[in-house]
Image: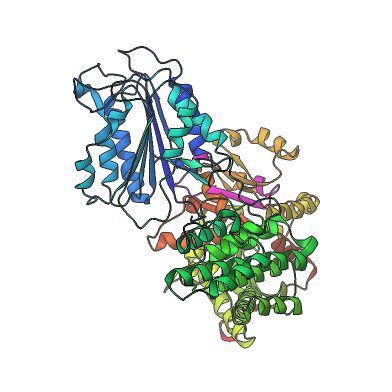
Amino acid sequence: MNAALPRRHLLVVAPQCRSMEHLDRLKGAATELQAVLLDHQLGACSGGLRDRRSLLTGQELNSDVIRLRVREAIEYAAEERAHLVLALLGHGFVPGDTATLYLMGADSTYGRTESGVNVGELLTGAVNHLTIPSVLGIIDTCHATAALPPLHDLTVGTANGLGRLAVLMGSAVHEEGVDLAFSRSLTEAIRAGESGGGPLLGVDWGKKAVRARGIGQRITGFELDADGRPAAALWIARNAAYHRVRPGGLTGPLAHERLSATLGALDPGEPQDRLPYDEKSARERLAELEALPRGLRQVAAVRAVDAVLVAVQSVAFIRSWLETDLTTALVNRALHTLLAREHRLPAEVLEHSEVEAVDRVVFDRPRADDDCRGSLTRFVVLLAQNAGRDLRDPELTRWGHRIDAQRELNDAVTKAAGVEHERRLRLVVSLHSSLTGDWPGDIGAWLLQDGKTLVKAEFECPSADMMGTELALRKALVWAETHAEVHGLDLKRIDVAAPGKLLLEWRPEEAGVVQKLGVDYDVVLHWSRRLTPDVVLKEIEPRIRDRAKKIAACAHGVPVDWLEPKDTEERDVLGHQLENGRFRQAIGLTHPHGVDDGLLETLLVHTPVLLWPHSTGTFPRERHGSLEANWRDMPEALVRSYQHGWLNQDVQDFAVLRAVWDDYEWLRFCLLYRTEIPPAQTLDEDDR
């Protein structure tokens, strides 16, 4: 099983046919099914249309619109390389003695094929898109089993018979569906899950689960999985009743799966209760396996049991070494960072215990790692760093020796030291000298090492406009890189502080003549008024620092209060809400409509982190989920999303956002700035 679940798109189509009996429970059944399939913990789907909608229903949903929207969903899934889940609910008919199902739109007439929607054609069209990994159909109509496409259409189509299709159908070819009982029962079954089952629920489970509820209909399931490459089976939902780790256990589900596969291949009669589960049983089984004749299956089994031994030893070490510092947030922050660096960050939000995290790192590692020890030592070093532990601690060294990973541990520690080396230096550039909020006559520059000022200077802007400011910024960068080289440090981060008006219209990461600044540097925006606060800002400053700490410490979800255009239209009302403490997190705007420097500065008085879309973009609620897996890696994740856009690579939905990110470190710098001696005199051209 791959713990990082793939991207899944959902479209539920539930038309009311005006020429047929009104289905009173249609909208409710469709809405409930949509809800469980969109639920991250269950169906893990996202909206299947380009506008992120996932449900089409009502008495105005005619057949032409259905065909158009399903084709749009297919094209969108193909572009995104997403698995497609297509659920069709409502009236359906089969013409004459054929076995072809037609879904009835609002304008359909029973028996008139030209007025209906050929379900098999829709499924075939989706399957034959080479970039759609798999298609799942859920059909709740009369004669639902007639939805199956002819087999020859699937085996000789564009996909050359390598398509992956699963269909779960709620009635037989000549049987009527009653009261949407099939989809309602399936929804209930998904919510309940299967006790003792695996982590994912497939079509065979769905068939049995709905049959067990006794709805009086013949439930049929079909699977065509001609592509042998995918590791995971076709599935409907995650198992809500799946216990990932047994209480008190030291091994996770991936270990159990690997052991079952490798030991079962070596001995088909291998009982499940003999699988190694702790250090003692793993050592005993390893000794047994090593005494067997060497062969491919024997080697695979030895490697699996060895990995289990390493995993259980590591869990025990982590618990004893970190003790009271070990928290869920600590574990998931380290795992998130590791997967981000390996470019394997999943769409899901990470919520793992230390057992599950080690299980994932050991058994779901990068292909480049021949052994689990490299990925595991990198994870443990990240844990140690986040907990503030010394990477030269003898206990850490002894753990590396114990699991035979001295070299891998040394590599991980060296790599971590290099990353910290890069983080030690940052260039701060501020435009706060502009008293009117327009382009300044000069900019201030500080080169910080470990949060302390190494050198500082001012740079004159040749002209009071964007071109003059960017020229001064480039000179400041040359100055900073020179000092960085002298001190043997690498500069990777540039903090740019500007007034609200310029934050709206300027993109400093795109400054540059030969190359954009953001290609090689993480350019982070700040609000320059915090450097020279008035009485109001000074009064609220302690609370802003506290909010910055809480935002950084958030372990689950996205700590953002989102405002729609209607929430910001009445500025007086918004001001009272802010004063009354209604918004205590980061603040995000979903639409650029009405956003001006006055609104930005009003909001920044009350929050250290502000997000808003570019002037040409929007960030509706349906897209907010794209931030979840990346929040712990912000604001750098936002910078990377811009870089991907420049290269025409896969771009995250949140790339439409701009951000002011006044984190705790920046707020401390603002305090230090006000207590330090003013910057040195402006450098003349001859001095540079």
Residue 485 falls inside the magenta stretch = no
Q: Position of residue 28 (x, y in %)?
A: 48, 22
Residue range of the region highlighted in magenta in the rendering = 602-622
Q: Nearer the viewer, residue 172 or 342?
A: 172
Q: Position of residue 576 (x, y in %)?
A: 72, 35
Q: Quadrant of residue 340?
A: bottom right
Q: Nearer the viewer, residue 669 or 582?
A: 582
Q: Position of residue 183 (x, y in %)?
A: 44, 27
Left of 455 or right of it: where is 231?
Answer: left
Q: Nearer the viewer, residue 215 or 463?
A: 215
One can see residue 367 in this view: yes
Residue 608 falls inside the magenta stretch = yes
Q: Nearer the viewer, residue 175 or 445?
A: 175
Q: Does 557 sit above or below residue 14?
A: below
Left of 220 or right of it: where is 353?
Answer: right
In what quadrant of the picture does the C terminus appear? bottom right
Q: Does 489 sit above or below residue 460?
A: below
Left of 635 or right of it: where is 664?
Answer: right
Q: Position of residue 60 (x, y in %)?
A: 35, 20
One can see residue 462 in this view: no
Give the residue at the far bottom of this rendering: 486
Residue at x-position 45% and y-position 61%: 265
Residue at x-position 61% and y-position 44%: 599
